[in-house]
Structure formats: C-alpha cells, structure tokens
Image: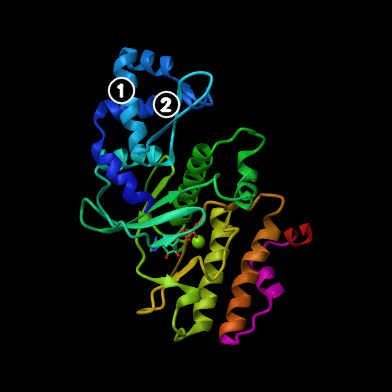
Amino acid sequence: MALRLSLHAYKKLESLDLRMLQIIEKNMAFYEYVPMEVICRRLRRDEKFVSRRLKFLNELGVVERLKGAYIGYILTSRGYDCLALNVLVKKRIVSNINLAPLGLGKESDVHLAISTSGDKIILKFHRLGRISFRQTRRFRDYVGERRHISWLYQSRLAAQKEYEALKILHSVKVSVPRPIFQNRHVVVMSYFSGIPLYKVPPLSDPLETLRTIIQNVRIAHLEAGVIHGDLSEYNVLVDVRNGSITIIDWPQWISSTHPLAYFYIKRDIENIIKFFRRKYKITMNLDEVLKDIVERGEGTAE
Ligand SMILES: Nc1ncnc2c1ncn2[C@@H]1O[C@H](COP(=O)(O)OP(=O)(O)O)[C@@H](O)[C@H]1O
Ligand SMILES: [Mg+2]
C-alpha cells in the first residue's frame, strides 16, 4: 500500500517539485519544519508560486505542513520514497516494480522489481523510527548519542549499513544477495529465488543445509569481520530446487571487533541450531561449533 501511493505521487511530480522536496530534505537537518522563506530563497521563486506548489505537494501527501508559529514543511515518508524512486529511475536501475510487497516487515517493505536489463531485483525500503521503541534500541549502537534522530536519518542509516555489509560479504563469497545500488533508505539487491527456512517443506538434506549456514556464518566472521546479529530461520532463504541458501537482512550487523561480538555470534548460531533441533531433530553442540568459529581467546569475552 505504502509504495503504491508513493509511486502514484511520484508520477505527478515535475522536476521543480522534486527540487523542492530535495530542499526540504536537506534543510530538515537544521529545522524541525523548514520555513517557507528558506524554500523560496533556495528555489529562487516568490512566495506565491512556492506556496501554491507546496499546497499541491501537501495534497499528494509528500510533505506535511506545520500548523503553528510559522509556515514550515517537512518531508513525509512518501516524499522520501519519491526522492529515492527518482534516483532509481534516472539512473536506470529499475524499470518496473511489483506493487504487492514480498515482505512487509516492521522495519522494511520489500518489493520485487525488474531491472532495465530485465533481471529480477529486490528493492528494500527501510522504514524506521516511527513504529516501535524496540527498533530504535536496535539501532542505538550506530546512531550513537544523536538525540533528535529522525526516522529519515535512521532509515537511511539502516540502508547504508545493510548495503555496506552486503558489499563486504559478497566480496568474500558469503551467500548473500548481490548488492546493486543504494540511495537514501532503499537498498537494491539481486533476487534470490527461495523461501524462508521456516516455511520450507521438509528439506531433503537438513544436516547439509545446517552445515552450509554455519560455514557462511564462519566466513562472514573470519573473513569479512561481520556478524549478522539477527540470524534466524526467518532470514535464511532456501532454494528448494537445489538446496542452496542465501542469508538476508543485514542492517543490524555487528563488527567482529565489537565488544559484544561473541554474544551476538553465539546467539545467531544458537537460533539456527535450535531451529534444526526443533524441526529436524538434528543435534549439534553449540560450544563445539563456536569453538570452531571463534578464534581462541575471544571465547572468554562473554
Ligand atoms: N534478495 C532477496 N531475494 C528474495 N526475497 C527477498 C530478498 N530479500 C528479502 N526478501 C523477501 O522479503 C522478506 C523480508 O526481507 P528482510 O530483508 O528479512 O526484511 P525484514 O525482515 O526487515 O522485513 C524476506 O522474508 C523474503 O521473503
Ligand atoms: Mg527479516
């Protein structure tokens, strides 16, 4: 639903409207609501013209007007979508987007799309900071002490972080989607034809799948210095035709040098081992797996 409305709005925008949205976006770092006069100045247009255009943008739901001491505007998430969509279109990254989301998480909307060369790709729109307290906490690690952090900033940071992880992981051949592009709160990656592990009809060789997942966690940690941090049967996709897997959903990754690295990698592996025990009655000893993955000495940091 969210993206349908964003695309609908995007199609109605002219280049001047997009400029106006960019001006508001930039100035949101300095004002809670960007004053109309600032917009006029940056756009070099008079107030009559700008206010007419802003009224139109407000009706489209891409900006929100301050009803208070002065006239000011902020971008809505629909407006932010429009700015990102515009870049994806202009850079010829995407030619068609499937409006029914593949996944509608609390923290993102994931859509299947078609690239300009005709490949299936994934657009992941990060949406943070407006839904729950938990997700704010999840990102506190890398937003640091910035107090008045906005949904816009958090969502962009999540996308940048996920894209960065995918680049590092892909370069050392961990099974992750291939990163293609990132702009604002959107990550573009290759599509993996698979379904989440928890939904898969019984695997033909579950022990092999479990070993493959653990091997990927191992390479990610030892060669890329990346720990997933939210690994579970929901974030592993399996292609049931050949049993191959891919690990998705990396925005909360933790560096292997993080003081809590051991805690996170242990929890990641434990989640996976528990799932295989529950569903496939396979037992694997957590400590032994960890010993094999975590280099000597780190194990005492728990
Ligand atoms: N690269 C991909 N290829 C195929 N499907 C994907 C891909 N990335 C995400 N998905 C689908 O979207 C869903 C949600 O993606 P995920 O990255 O886990 O986001 P979140 O859990 O934060 O909503 C996944 O369960 C999967 O069905
Ligand atoms: Mg997920």
Q: Secondary structure at mark 2?
A: helix
Res 91 visible: no
- 10 Å crowding of disc 2: few (<14), some (14-19), many (20+): many
Categorize mark 1 by other alpha carbons within 10 Å: few (<14), some (14-19), many (20+): few
Instruction: Identify residue for label 2.
Output: 24
Tell me residue 241's x, y (percent): 35, 79
Q: Which corner quadrant holds the C terminus?
A: bottom right
Identified at 38% across, 62% down, the residue is 102
Q: Which is more foreground, mark 1 or mark 2? A: 1
Residue 282 belongs to the span the image colors magenta: yes
Residue 17 in the image: x percent, y percent? 29, 28
**37 over 114 or under it: above or below:** above
Residue 126 at x, y = what percent?
Answer: 46, 48
Q: Quadrant of residue 110?
A: bottom left
Using the image as rendered, state which of residue 151 and residue 271 is in the foreground.
Answer: 151
Mark 1–mark 2 distance (CA, rounded to whole Å): 16 Å
Task: Kindly tell me whether residue 167 is visible in this rendering.
Answer: yes
**Which portion, as a residue range, is magenta?**
280-296
In the displayed structure, 134 sits above or below 284; it is above
Question: 193 above or below 137?
Answer: below
Label 1: which residue? Answer: 52
Left or right: where 129 falls relative to 173: right
